[in-house]
Amino acid sequence: MIVNISDYGDMGDKKFIEYSVSGLSEMQLDYLKTNLNEDIVVKDDVLTLTMHFSDELYPFQSDVAKIRLDDFIAREEIEMTVFLSSFLEDM
């Protein structure tokens, strides 16, 4: 599984992060589409998952995140990989 952040920012009064997830089997894609409560689109075997955040929980809001954005993006990608992996263990 490969997780990349493909977009992030403001959407109305909420913040969002859009993750692109590739390398999943069809069964895993179906499981995630059925069991995750987030905005999900699957196109060409790539799952796009959009997470919405309040200002307080948005991971890129701090001054440090603005200075070291690449580090924060990498950390978010790792955290989503771990979350999805643990979620898929319940299949």
Image (cartoon, grey):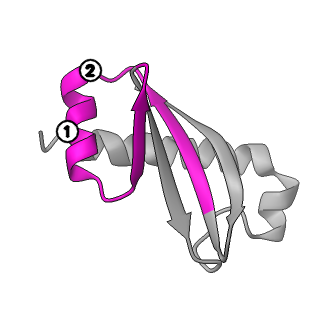
Name the residue tied to disc 1.
Answer: 31
Q: Is residue 31 left or right of residue 54?
A: left
Disc 1 crowd rating (10 Å Cα; few below 14, some 14-19, many 20+) is some
Label 2 belongs to which residue? 25
Q: Is residue 10 left or right of residue 83?
A: right
Please, what is the three-letter code of the amino acid marked with disc 1?
A: Tyr
Above or below for 80 versus 26: below
Give, as a single range, the part of the protein colored magenta: 16-44
Q: Position of residue 47 (x, y in %)?
A: 42, 33
Q: Inspect the magenta stretch and tell me whether residue 60 lies in it.
A: no
Residue 61 numbered mark, or none:
none
Q: Is residue 6 above or below residue 12?
A: above
Which quadrant of the rendered structure holds the C terminus? top left
Tally of numbered tags: 2
Q: Closer to the N terminus: mark 2 or mark 1? A: 2
Q: Quadrant of residue 62?
A: bottom right
Determine whether label 2 and label 1 are within 8 Å by CB. Answer: no
In the rendered view, tell whether residue 13 sits above or below residue 59: below
Q: How far is disc 2 from disc 1 in space, using C-alphas?
A: 10 Å
Question: Which residue sits at x=72%, y=46%?
Answer: 71
Looking at the figure, which quarter contains the N terminus?
top left
Under circle 2, the secondary element is loop
37 with respect to 88 (left or right): right
Q: Position of residue 79 (x, y in %)?
A: 48, 48
Residue drawn at (72%, 58%) of the image: 9
Examine the structure image and report whether residue 38 is included in the region drawn in magenta.
yes
Disc 1 on helix, strand or loop?
helix
